[in-house]
Amino acid sequence: MSQPSNQTAAVAPLTAVVFAYNQAPVVEAAVRAVFSQTVQPAEIILSDDASRDDTHAIMRRLADEYRGPATVRVRRTEGGAGWFAHINACVAAASHPWVLVCAGDDISMPERVARFAEEIAAHPEARLIWSRMERMRADGTFTGQAMGLTDYQAGRLRGVGASQCWHRDLLAVFGDLPAVHAAEDIVLPFRAWLLDGLRFLPEPLVHWRDRDYRQLNREQLDATYEIRATVYRVNAARILLDDLAVARRLQPRREAEFSALHARLLRTLDAASAEHEAVSANGRAARAVAILTRMRRLGFKRARRLWQDQVLRLPAYLDSAYPRGIRRWLPRLAGVAATAATAFLFAKRVPPAVTIAASAAALPVAAEICRMAMRYAAAKLWRPA
């Protein structure tokens, strides 16, 4: 443990935890960003989840070098207990009720602790606070692109991102996170929403390191992201249902709201289960059949995404090959052009009702064809080494 020096500095009464696992090439930048905050957290925990590389040794060296006002502790989870067990252990080890999450491959902006401390002081009822992020390339260069969820909707399996600050009540009220694979940025914001304690900061306060998917072949991509992601969604939906049951006992006045949410979560769980069944099928043909036979359970949008990804081999990450403006507007412009062309060609040959119907259908079809063409071109450029 590194004790604080006599150096005078502003200190916020919260614990910052750097969570790391096999991140030796990038963890030093993450730790130094926490050490360099304009307002220091009162406590910093550098936590390694049984990494097989030099992550733990780097954390120990950096802790020994630290000369700031915070108390610095280095811990290690033996045996690789898993992400949720890692979170449970770090929240239990924290000396303060608020825990600022710092991923071992991201970089906190210098004012991050100060802004979260201000929000905590202004809103003592809060139980989870998150901010926007700025995308950072895998090599550590910044893009200037703001990202992250800004409008939370309860019951949807969308994570708020790696910019959170948690209050320990999220575990005290609902219990420790269960020993399953799921995303904490789906589960814990839902708990905070149930407690009416969810807060959002609109400015980007974390540089989020993007993954370089070009380093993965198709089998690795499926195993590491697609199939794993569907397992995470199924488990998250089950946890949300369990947490909702706790909230229904604690807040009977919200029974009508919670009853409707329970029905929505059951549908969400069914869709997530159908998605997992589809991506777990062996081979493209089997996946195509699985998607088509589960269309109603999946919903059109998710079925369309799975079809492009699992059958046509055009995953959504290929959109990142293009600047944001191009991937956002080019398909729309293609749709508008197709709509205008359809209206012009049909206007003098078919009844007006048919012209209107054909023109309305042309826009989404042309936009989707343009999007697939862009992904196909990106796939040719982004072939794994």
Image (tube, grey):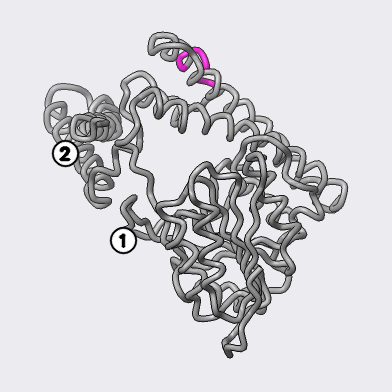
Magenta range: 291-296
Q: Residues within 10 Å of mark 2 (few under 14, many from 20)?
A: some
Q: Residue at x 26, y 24 (%)?
A: 354
Image location (x, y in percent) of residue 353:
28, 27
Three-letter code for the amino acid on which mark 2 is drawn = Ala
For residue 9, what is the image quadrant?
Answer: bottom right
Q: Is the magenta stretch mostly helix, strand or loop?
A: helix
C-alpha separation, residue under disc 2 versus residue under disc 1: 35 Å
Q: Residue at x 55, y 23 (%)?
A: 276
Above-or-below relation of 40 to 220: below
Q: Which residue is drawn at 22% across and 33% down?
A: 370
For residue 2, what is the image quadrant?
Answer: bottom right
Identify the secondary structure beneath mark 2: helix
Camera-nearest residue between 105 and 2: 2
Disc assigned to residue 142: 1
Above-or-below relation of 232 to 146: above
Task: Please indicate, yes or no, whether residue 362 appears anywhere in the rendered image.
Answer: no
Image location (x, y in percent) of residue 341:
14, 33
Image location (x, y in percent) of residue 134:
39, 60
Above-or-below relation of 361 to 162: above
Three-letter code for the amino acid on which mark 1 is drawn = Phe
Q: Which residue is drawn at 63% across and 40% down?
A: 80
Task: Please indicate, yes or no, whether residue 279 appears anywhere in the rendered image.
Answer: yes
Camera-nearest residue between 346 and 229: 229
Disc assigned to residue 337: 2
Image location (x, y in percent) of residue 74:
63, 61
Disc assigned to residue 15: none
Q: Residues within 10 Å of mark 1 (few under 14, many from 20)?
A: some
Left or right side of 74 for 369: left
Identify the secondary structure beneath mark 1: strand
> Quarter of the image containing the C terminus?
top left
> Quarter of the image containing the N terminus?
bottom right
